[in-house]
Amino acid sequence: MLNAIYLYRISHWLYVHHIPLLPKFFQLLIFVIYNCSVPYKCKIGKGSFFNHGGIGVLLNNGVVIGEGCKIGNNASIVGQGPYRHVPRLGNKVYVGPGAVIQGPVIIEDYVIVAPNAVVTRSVPAYMIVAGVPAKIIGDSRNLNYDIFKNESFDEGVKEYMKPCVKEV
């Protein structure tokens, strides 16, 4: 299946093997097709992927994403002036849709960044962060499910979705 991460891997391979012009062509192709910026100078580990093909994802040059990470649509992983360094994500990091990770921060392994969170500080391993600015709200080891599995096993609905039933 052709998606932004697949095209990125081609462009990064071309870049690493010093093949001129083609990496820039693939970066432009990613932008035109998926409306996202995934530079060939980034490093994205094996098994990492973008949800929904990577629509709207924005990465700065030099961003490092570990193995087995899940990046939501419209997520931004960017630098912050005047700092030269950009974010580094460890392994098995989940970045929710619309989340922003900004600055020279390190997001350690098994971290969950909630949708629309704005992360401006480094996050220790196994933490769940949410909010603007993002704060630690939990520990990912305490979840009763694996956020990295693509399972759809629960047929129920959340409590607030159930219709109100008044007893007569």
Image (tube, grey):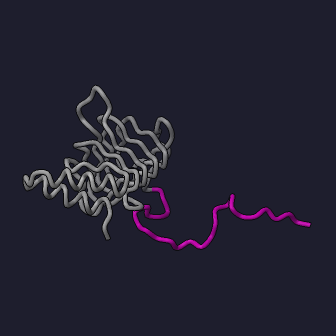
Residue sitting at the far right: 168
The residue sitting at 44% across, 45% down in the picture is 99
Q: What residue appears at the point 19 percent right and 61 percent down from the top-left corner?
A: 10
Q: Is residue 133 left or right of residue 162?
A: left
Locate residue 89, reporting x and y percent: 30, 47
- Asked whether, in this view, residue 132 is left or right of residue 82, the answer is right
- Whether residue 58 appears in magenta in the rendering, the answer is no
Q: How many marks?
A: 0
**84 vs 34, nearest the viewer:** 34
Q: What residue do we see at 33% from left, 57% from top?
A: 69
Q: Which secondary structure type mostly characterizes the magenta part of the structure? A: loop
For the C terminus, the quadrant is bottom right
Using residue 98 as the reference point, say whether residue 5 is left or right of it.
left
Specify the segment rendered in magenta.
Answer: 142-168
Position of the N terminus by quadrant? bottom left
Which x, y percent locates residue 161?
A: 68, 61
Q: Position of residue 72 (x, y in %)?
A: 42, 54
Which corner quadrant of the image does residue 12 belong to? Answer: bottom left
Can residue 165 be found in the magenta stretch? Answer: yes
Q: Nearer the viewer, residue 115 or 41?
A: 41
- Residue 129 appears in which quarter of the rendering? top left
Check the image and report above or below for 7 versus 58.
Answer: below
Residue at the top extreme of this rendering: 82
Q: Nearer the viewer, residue 144 or 22?
A: 22
Query: Does residue 88 sit above or below 156 in this rendering?
Result: above
User: Looking at this rendering, what residue extends furthest in the left direction?
Assistant: 18
Residue beneath the point at 56% across and 71% down? 154
Name the spot of residue 49 as percent of width and height, x first: 33, 60
